[in-house]
Image: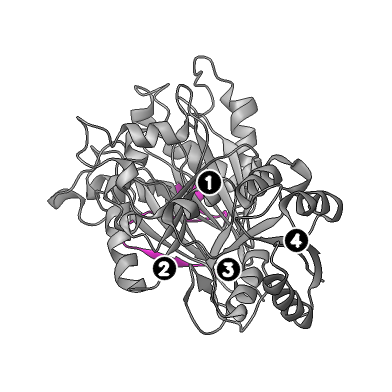
Amino acid sequence: MKTVLIIDDDQACREPVAELLRGDGWTVHEAENGQTGLDAARRLKPDAIVCDLLMPVTNGFQLCHAVRQEKSLKHVKILVLTGRDYPTDRKIAEELGADDYLVKPMEIRHLVDALERLVGIEDSGDAIVGGHKMGGEDLPPRIKFWGVRGSTPTPGPDTIQYGGNTSCVEVRADGELIIFDAGSGIRPLGNSLAQEFDDHPIDANLLLTHTHWDHIQGFPFFGPAYNPNNLIRIFGMEGARKGLRETLEDQMQSPYFPISMAQMAANIIIEEVKEMRFKIGPLTVEACYVNHPDVCVGYKVITSHGSICYIPDHESAPEGFAIAGSHVPSTIQKRVIEFAQNAEVLIMDAQYTYEEYRTHVGWGHGCLDEVVRVAKEAKVTRLYLFHHDPGHDDEFIANMLVRAQELAEGSGLIVEAAREGEMITLPAKV
């Protein structure tokens, strides 16, 4: 049974909510101000907290911040229920740790639905993304490539088959919208989402592997970030020199860009990843440091139909190649193989052929032969060659794919080269 703590100094608001939630099978606790609520949260460790903003002793902003500082309360979902509809209040609450923000007056049933979504309880059976019903039965996860190129965009007649946009991959799984990286491919993704959702709010989770330009350069052109109805959560590691927020803001400052990040009207929450395992709704996300200059990770999303592993930048060196300052064969490579173990889909940096890698040792990108070996050893189901070199045209990539399939022959591993616009659906579990 799920447990909720309702914190509100207005008894007339608190009691109807408590009564309805009890009727829905929740264990309900109540507190009349922020401080007693915080003390109760520490003692009870509920699944969720519903709190007002303007409360005596400790207000809702302070409560959100305090809860997020307590390691034992990291799992707790916080839903702010308030009569204030100022965009600034919403933004500050979310930055301080609120998972959702609802404005009174409202139908109490909407609050119940929001709580059930936050803590992973299924309601009517419809999958929900950002409040927009996707409808029907429980659809298996799907992946769509919006940008597959590395380093710099390469539009033109020679890249039509595989695409010229830089890294961006969309994942829909278990009612959540995940976006891997914000290369130039995020612009057409944003246009597609705006058309699909129409006037419904978009709730998206952007996972950045690192902040090299080809992985963030499309974010200023991501249309949903300018719509105040949308919620964009950005996850990533702190950089070697600057924090994640500062890096994203810098690329939108004059003289580089005419519109600042502060002018993006969406509710944007930036979360620097501290733990290598965290939750996004019902999904478990794991991160793994990889072999690439600066701070860079790969991500694994564990869905109800298997795991999706995304490692777009990683120098996987064949045996016999020494990389200065790295112990790839014995340490990092072993960790990556363990990380990708039994993944349904592995999307991995395979930028260079074996011959090319000889002259690109230490550049931070993968050798095709070694990438296939890693996928075979990790026993993944499907490998997608990714982060195509800007100097490789469609014919060159097709030849690399043939080579990779030859290397995988007899192992049961399915190998493809990622193509812009391609959609993959994970098989249903039986």
The numbered mark, 4 or 2, whose residue comes first in the sequence reads: 4
Residue at the top extreme of this rendering: 324
Residue located beneath label 2 in the image: 201
Q: Residue at x 20, y 44 (%)?
A: 154
Residue type indicated by callout 1: Glu
Q: What secondary structure is marked by label 2?
A: loop
Q: What secondary structure is marked by label 4?
A: loop
**Is 128 rendered above or below residue 153?**
below
Q: Nearer the viewer, mark 4 or mark 1?
A: 1
The numbered mark, 1 or 3, whose residue comes first in the sequence reads: 1
Residue type indicated by callout 3: Asp
Magenta residues (range): 406-426
**Is 415 rendered above or below residue 121?**
above
Residue located beneath label 1 in the image: 95
Residue at the right extreme of this rendering: 43
Residue located beneath label 4 in the image: 47
- The quarter of the picture where residue 144 lies is bottom left
Q: What is the C-alpha distance between the residues marked 3 and 4? A: 19 Å
Residue type indicated by callout 4: Asp
Question: Is disc 1 in contact with disc 2, using a CB cutoff of under 8 Å?
Answer: no
Question: Measured from the top left, where is residue 126 in percent x and y?
Answer: 56, 80
Q: What is the C-alpha distance between the residues marked 4 and 2? A: 25 Å
Q: Is residue 157 magenta?
A: no
The answer to whether one can see residue 352 in this image is no
Question: Measured from the top left, where is residue 394 in percent x and y?
Answer: 23, 50
- The quarter of the picture where residue 344 lies is bottom right
Q: Is 426 left, or right, of 39 in this rendering?
A: left
Q: Which mark is residue 174?
A: 3
Q: Is 96 left, or right, of 258 in this rendering?
A: right
Q: Nearer the viewer, mark 3 or mark 2?
A: 2
